[in-house]
Amino acid sequence: MNAQQIPVVVVGGGIAGMAACHALAQKGIPFLLLEQSSRLGGVLETFREGPYQMEMGPFSFLPKAASLLKLAQDLGVGDERIESDPQAAQNRYVLKGRKLVRLPLTPKDFLFSSLLSPWAKLRFLLEPFAKGAPPHEETIAEFVKRRAGQAVLDNMIGPFVSGVVAGDPYKLSIAAQFPIFKELENKYGSLLKAFAERLKANPAPPTLFSFKNGMETLANAFLKKYGESVQLDTRLDVIPAKAGIQSIAKHLILATPAYIAAKLLEP
């Protein structure tokens, strides 16, 4: 399909691009999705080896992600959704020094865990006395180091960020990615105090969801439904400054990371 024959071209086949395309389709607007790699999904990638199924990116999503749940339902894979086992969810592990170490989820587990050194635990317990937020927008790494220390970032929060959003905590904004932490800091002045209060109000951890065949299920379902409107292995270098968007399509949606969008729009 030629890009100039349709009204909208979407660049980027990650979750944002797929969601944008689906929204267009629901309104009856033809689209063409361009993806530079040989697969859809972006950071959503499920890897299988023998009996094991592993996620290369995010491994789950929360029930509050209503738009994602609706997308799954619309793509016909809503019934493939599975939820985490509350008991099994208590056993989460982090790879440290080539060994799997159980992630402490209770105060008692924290005190006896080998994930953090005694000094790192003390630093974490001093979190209520952390200095206030700087005037600039903090990254996740800056926020965690300020409040809990480097060890907590490396051994607990870093793996969490990788597993949930497949991103780099040194590049992601804490306010944009996890605004709840900034809200709790502003309200309680301490994350430990905030977590203690929230634990009293709701002791059960939130249920996490995935799909029977992994998070890549969404991309596979999208390709099955809209495959004729997808072009893989298609690289768009730079949008010409003079001709602009009109040289590509009547309308253009850049569903790419910001740094890639910036390069595409370079004068």
Image (cartoon, rainbow, N blue to C red):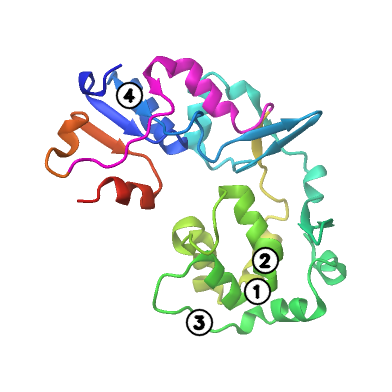
Return the x and y of residue 65 as percentages of the image width and height.
52, 40
In the drawing, what numbered circle is on residue 154? 2
Would you say residue 140 sits in the magenta stretch? no
Q: Amino acid at mark 1?
A: Gln
Q: Which residues are magenta?
A: 212-240
> Which residue corresponds to mark 3?
132
Kindly check if marks 2 and 4 are in contact, taking CB atoms under 8 A apart as contact. no
* Numbered disc 4: secondary structure: strand
* Numbered disc 1: secondary structure: helix
Q: Residue at x 43, y 28 (%)?
A: 233
Q: Which quadrant holds residue 6?
A: top left
Return the x and y of residue 98 as percentages of the image width and height.
82, 57
Q: Amino acid at mark 3?
A: Gly
Q: Residue at x 39, y 26 (%)?
A: 22
Q: Nearer the viewer, mark 2 or mark 3?
A: 2
Q: Residue at x 72, y 55 (%)?
A: 203
In the drawing, what numbered circle is on residue 222? none
Q: Amino acid at mark 2?
A: Asp
In whole angstroms, how far apart are the C-alphas of marks 1 and 4?
44 Å
In the drawing, what numbered circle is on residue 32? 4
Q: Extreme left residue here?
A: 242
Kindly check if marks 4 and 3 are in contact, taking CB atoms under 8 A apart as contact. no
Q: Answer with left or right where residue 184 lies relative to residue 212.
A: left
Could you tell which of marks 1 and 3 lies nearer the N-terminus? 3
* Numbered disc 3: secondary structure: loop
